Amino acid sequence: MTSPQTYPYPQARQFASQLPVERTRLSHALRSEWTKIWSVRSTMWTLGVMLVLVIGINLLIVVPIANSSDTSVPVLAPGLFGLLLGQLAVITLGVLVISSEYGTGMIRTTFTSCPQRSRVLAAKAIVFFAVSFVTTTVACLVTAVVSWSVTSGKDVLSYDGDSTQPGVVIRDGVTTASGSEWLGATVGVGLYVALLGLLALAVGTLLRHSAGAVTTMLGVVLLPLLVAIFLPDSLDSLRENLIRFSSPNSLASLYRIPMIGSDDQTGLLQLIVLACVTAATLGAAFVTVNVRDV
C-alpha cells in the first residue's frame, strides 16, 4: 500500500483590491442622506405645501388690514396663523424620512451599505434638521418682513381702542418690532418647528409605520389643547400647563401673543422643554434601531 502523495500547491494569495479603499465616515453618510432626501418627491411636496401655507395665509391676513389703524396686535403676529398649519407639513416630512425606507424595504440596503446604524440615524437627523430649520426660518423671515412692512409705523394716538396691549412695541409714537421679537418670529420659530420635525423622525424610527407615526404626532400637537378645554375646574393647574406647553401656545408665545399666562412670555421655556423631549425620544430611537431587527 502506498501512501498518498502530496503536491506542493501554491498558497492562495490574499485578495487585494486595485481600487483605492477609503474608510467610511459620518461625512459619507451625510452625503448619502442629503442625496436621498432631495431625490424623493415627498420632500418637495411637503416643503412646498409648508411654504404656500405659511406665506399664503400671511398674505391673506395682512392685505385686508393694511389700511386699518388697529395697533392692539404685535407687528409680526400675523405670521403665526399660517405656521399653525405649516408645521404639520414639516412633521409629515420628519416621519417620512425614516418610515418610508421601512415601508419599501430600502432600509435593509441602507444598513447593508452602512452597518453602523447609529451613524445612519445621526446622518438622517442632522440632514433633516438642517433642511427643515433653514426652510422654516426663511419662510418666517418672509412673513415677518411682509407683516412689518404692512402693520408697522401706525400712529398709536389715532387709534380709538386700547393700544397698550401686551407684546406691542411703540417707539416714537408708532408701532414697531423689537430685536427680540424679530429673533423669536424667525430663528425661534424655525428652531421650534425643526425640533418638532426631529421629534417626528424619532417617533417614526420607533414605530416604523408612516400612518401610525403621523397620527401620533398629530396627537402630540393637537391633543394637549383639546384635552385642556374639557378638563374640570378642579384640574385647573393641569389645564394651564397643558395649554402653556401645547404647540399652538408655544408658537404664539414666540410671536408675543400667548394664550394664557404672563404677558412677558417669549417662548424660550417651551423651546427648552421641546428640546429635552426630543433628545429623550431620539435617544430611545438610537437604542431601538441598534437592538431591533429590520
Image (cartoon, rainbow, N blue to C red):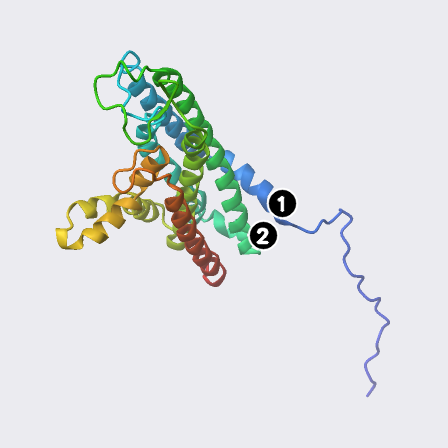
At label 1, the amino acid type is His
Nearer to me, 30 or 7: 30
Residue pushed farthest right? 8
Please state the horizontal and vertical placement of residue 83, each as a whole percent of the image: 34, 31
Query: Which quadrant, please, contains the N terminus?
Result: bottom right
| Figure check: 186 above or below 146 | below
| Figure check: 122 above or below 170 | below
Query: Are the two marked residues, 2 and 1, in contact with CB atoms closer than 8 angstroms?
Result: yes
Residue pushed farthest top? 67
Residue at numbered disc 2: 114
Left or right of 220 in this view: 12: right
| Residue at disc 2, secondary structure | loop
Dot placed on the residue nearer the N-terminal end, 2 or 1: 1
Residue name at image x 44 percent, y 34 percent: 43
Please state the horizontal and vertical placement of residue 196, each as a whole percent of the image: 39, 43
Nearer to me, 108 or 164: 164
- Is residue 93 in sight in this rendering? no
Residue at numbered disc 1: 28
Label 2: few (<14), some or many (≥20) within 10 Å? Answer: some
| Residue at disc 1, secondary structure | helix
Residue name at image x 61 percent, y 48 percent: 26
Please state the horizontal and vertical placement of residue 212, each as a whole percent of the image: 31, 49
